[in-house]
Amino acid sequence: MYLGLNNKIIFAFILGILLVGTVSALTFDNRLKSYDELTKTIIIDDNFGLGGDLVKVQLLSNTYTCGVECSTVWNVTIYKDDDNFLSSMEFKQIQGTGGIKSIKYEVITGYRDVVVEDKVADCTNKDERGLCTGRVIGTHIEKIPIWSTFDPARKLVPGNYIIKLTGQKEWDDTIDWIPTFYGEKITQWAFWAAQDPTTVWEFNEDVGDRDLKDTLGLKNITLNNTFGIIRDPGKLNNSVSLNITGGGTSALNVTGGSQFAFGTDVFTVAYWIKGAKPGSGNHEVLGTSNSVGSWKVVSDTAGAEHEWQAGAGRIIGTIVPANNGNWQRVVWVRSGTGANQFRVYINNTNVENGTWSLDNTDASSDFNINTPNVNNNDSFDSVQIYKGYAFTVADVNEDWNNGAGIEAGSLTVSTFVVGLNSPTNNSLFTTSNVTFNASVTSILATNLTNATLRVYNSTTNLFNESVVTVTGDSVINESLFNVDNFIIGTYFWNVEFCGIADNVTASTVCS
């Protein structure tokens, strides 16, 4: 399987005599018995089906888009004490040049119990800042898996295993990982694609420029006035300073949108900040209003700690001052809604963990950066929001870059990740009728409109062009085209998907 990100991928297939290639003496009679696309489950049997099932493997999860650390989890059921079930693992470079840096395999060897408090928002009893508080109404037990190192080369006795593969790559690389189980190569599964932010403000515009651009073009900010706003050298290139003195009203805000409503999904919010603690009271660093379904980050007076505030009051905070007069990198990560899956890092150090299971659905209010309610002077650089992606520890470290920081990747406005599933590369056919199966994962486009198949009988001569209507907003994986009247020869093919982008211009995008 090959996948393309914002480029055209072409597969070749040959109409002619079907030949049987060489195979391993130990696996020649194994076969892929079945593949269920809905559950991502494959079954491989022995002796051309006469020897019974060997293994069942289900793809439980996969980081389809990721930064420098990616992972996939399989549910493996071994039916026979045979050879090691994983014959090999191939990593194919699709975008970029970095390749796989390292990999590791782990297996769940047990579980530990963690007690988690159940909280509800209590807006009848607000704190001294007028914020809703959280009230504990009980507790529950969550089982946290214990991951241990696993050697895929060893034989496994019959039974069930949960196995995780973790790989390190360059941030802008897209890698297709292709396992071979008991001699059967599995090309139907998944990939690790480059990850860009949902929204990012780098503040690299020239001094005096009134337009602060979201690099992805989705949420640009236009300054209504320049009172108290200073453009100066930042941590990374230029930055914006919001000089709030004498009760000034300088702040950055943009209309709310789905980029800021995370639901119960994973997310990352990261920013560079330089400033002093508020002279009195507290002030908002960034975020939306304090309704039960929204969120914001608040800097407190006492120690200039940054706190994540939601409908249930304070969730977690930086513990140490985030406003101390120096540039500091603050990263908030929710990798799940379970125990301690909400984390905050300051300067590459994990300072507090907590649990935040709130369904964050309210993004109707303006998104503010440094909303002033007290005298203050903060500078901001590289504010990034990743909806649907949680930084790993390796990602946080890469973003920190030994204190030098790093711009938010290549930021080539990704539209789709396209997969050409079948015919696979160099396939042989003895029929004049061929069915073409392709898949697409939408990155920024929300309304898919059509797909176009192009088949060439050389690299330039168009043999067939077909257009079909497609709909959806996430993933499509289906047989889209059936083409007849092929004659003996070599053919090349690709598929282009188009849709309406979720940006301010609702432009048509294709890939």
Image (spheres, grey):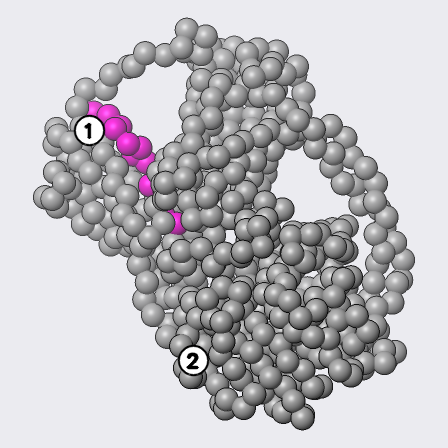
Left or right side of 294 for 152 = left
The type of residue carrying mark 1 is Ile
Residue holding disc 2 = 207
Q: Is residue 2 visible?
A: yes
Left or right side of 333 for 488 = left
In this rendering, the answer to whether 115 lies above or below 199 is above
In the rendered image, which quarter contains the N terminus? top left
Location of residue 346 by image quarter: bottom right
User: Residue drawn at (50%, 56%), measured in percent from left and top?
Assistant: 406
Q: CA distance from mark 2 to mark 1?
A: 59 Å
Residue placed most toward the observer, 468 or 455: 455
Nearer the observer, disc 2 or disc 1?
Answer: 2
In the rendered image, which quarter contains the C terminus? bottom left
Q: Position of residue 386 (x, y in %)?
A: 54, 60
In this rendering, the answer to whether 423 lies above or below 248 is above
User: Residue drawn at (51%, 69%), measured in percent from left and top?
Assistant: 234
Circle 2: element type = loop
The type of residue carrying mark 2 is Val
**Magenta residues (range):** 417-430
Near mark 2 (Cα within 10 A), the count class, few <14, some 14-19 or many ≥20, is some
As for residue 153 lying within the magenta part, the answer is no
Residue holding disc 1 = 14
